[in-house]
Image: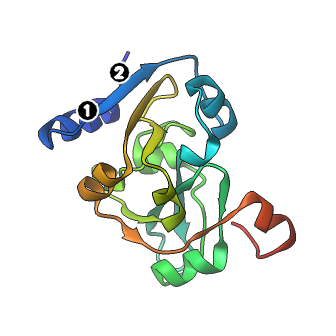
Amino acid sequence: MSTPTYNKIIQTLDEHACKYETQHHEPTRTSEIAARVRGVSMHSGAKAIVTKGHKTGTNYLFVMPADFKLWGSAAKRACGEAVGFETDPEGATGCVPGSVPPFGSLLGLKTFVDPHLSENEIIHFNAGSLTDSVSMRYEDWLAIEKPIVVEIAKSVEETKNGPESV
């Protein structure tokens, strides 16, 4: 059963005459499970994290490779305020945790993307559903979503010894 967000994504991609593939699969709540089920690397997963600004209460969407973590101080520089994870992502987006797509524009959220995601020709993401994924060219996603491209994440390896993550 498709969700309203899934339908919006497919409609948007079709309106832009964008090539994409969909995949229906077992529920995937984590990036690791999603990569395994899709048969792709974690790095090609477009992980979308919903945050909430500490001062304004504004929600932001941060998108990065699935093997990266949000870097708190970089996220603060990007949006102008300290952020934390949104405790009710479903209330903010209409999507259950783990199903938020990298399309903040369809969810009413300002979208930021880490430039490391561009290392993938094809990106993969849950499309408003834990059981439905979309695979598409990164360049097409960038052209449609028009996110702010800024360093906001660090690889899991870098975060083990380095900067804080949110």
What is the image's colouring? rainbow
Amino acid type shown at disc 2: Ser
Q: Secondary structure at mark 1?
A: helix
Q: Is residue 114 visible?
A: no
Q: Which residue is tagged 1?
A: 10
Amino acid type shown at disc 1: Ile
Circle 1 residues within 10 Å: few <14, some 14–19, many ≥20: some
Do residues under tags 2 and 1 come within 8 Å of each other at their CB atoms?
yes
Which quadrant holds the N terminus? top left
Q: Earlier in the sequence, mark 2 or mark 1?
A: 2
Residue at 50 percent across and 22 percent down: it is 131
Nearest the viewer among 133 and 38 is: 38
Q: Which residue is tagged 2?
A: 2
Residue at 69 percent across and 36 percent down: it is 32
Please tell me whether residue 151 is drawn above or below residue 86 in the rendered image: below
The nearer-to-camera label among 2 and 1 is 1
User: Where residue 26 sits in the image (x, y, percent)?
Assistant: 57, 17
Q: CA distance from mark 2 to mark 1?
A: 10 Å
User: Where residue 146 sits in the image (x, y, percent)?
Assistant: 28, 63
Q: Secondary structure at mark 2?
A: loop
